[in-house]
Image (cartoon, rainbow, N blue to C red):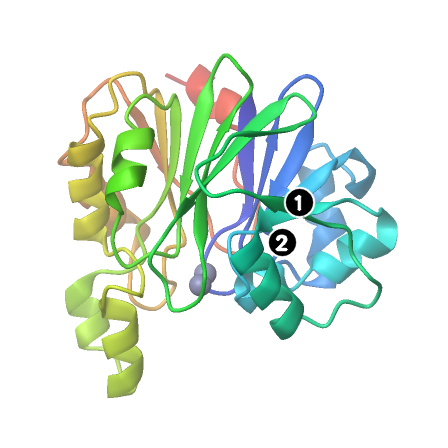
Amino acid sequence: MRFCSLSSCSYANSVVIQDNHTCILVDCGLRKRDIKPFLNHVGMTVKDIDAVLVTHCHIDHTYGLNYILAEKEVPIYSTSGVLKELNINYQFKRVPKLLTLQMEQLEFIDTLQVTPFKLSHDVQTVGFLISDGNESLGYLTDTGYVPEQCLEAFQSVNYLYIESNHDVVMYQNSSKPYYVKRRNLGPNGHLSNNQCSQALVDLRLAQCSLVTLAHLSEEDNEPELALRTAKANLMKDIQLVAAPPRKPGEWSNVTLKKR
Ligand SMILES: [Zn+2]
Ligand SMILES: [Zn+2]
């Protein structure tokens, strides 16, 4: 299996994951104008997508759903709690096919196996363990901390896509209102660089070949700082990259070939 971020930041998040038979998007926070060019840039079209997994209802993860659905009626998967909030908060232009995943239970989406895990954010949010039966990817963004169940389940992933949202000092010094700071730095907010780095230790990652840092704040983080903080706690033989904001990154198999 391989994966590629189409955009990763507080503005728009979306990742393509595929094996030889199945192609899914995790989230689609892209603007209409970006969907086709970004997919084309990584060699894909909307027609290639078989399903969309949604982590939570925030607009940076859902904005483009209507544009995907206008091109192709793909099913949208998540847990019942996430789908309920999605239905309330997102204006679907046509009735979508919503399919429910059970928390911590494996479900097949064609050839890909998907298991959701509860995260800690200010709305219902899940991370995903995604496997092609051979390799697996841990997907973990938009959470104030890494819950124990995730730490256990992601120990043996081959790839980790993990949030490294902000540098705490940069965030505290920002001009954001107090209530925003309290929310985002709290247990229902986002993982800081230091929390991400600690998670890399806690996860051990004995089988992992690639860690992608994701959802970096464009205002309160620097890619070099996030990478340096993560690298300090990462085994040398694990490749480390940061997913770029507002544009596609490269496919995981391309990154791994560069070693
Ligand atoms: Zn987000
Ligand atoms: Zn969010």
The residue located at (18%, 23%) in the rendering is: 235
SS under mark 2: loop
Q: Position of residue 30 (x, y in %)?
A: 64, 58
SS under mark 1: strand
Mark 2 burial class by Cα count in 10 Å: few <14, some 14-19, many 20+: many
Q: Given contact means CB atoms under 8 Å apart, are the residues at marks 1 and 2 in contact?
A: yes
The amino acid sitting under disc 2 is: Cys
Residue 84 to residue 115: above or below: below
Numbered label tally = 2
Q: Position of residue 14 (x, y in %)?
A: 57, 49
Q: Quadrant of residue 234?
A: top left
- Location of mark 2 (residue): 28
- Location of mark 1 (residue): 52
The residue located at (47%, 17%) in the rendering is: 135
Q: Position of residue 179 (x, y in %)?
A: 28, 85
The amino acid sitting under disc 1 is: Val
Q: Quadrant of ligand 1?
A: bottom left
Q: Quadrant of residue 178?
A: bottom left
Q: Quadrant of residue 70?
A: bottom right
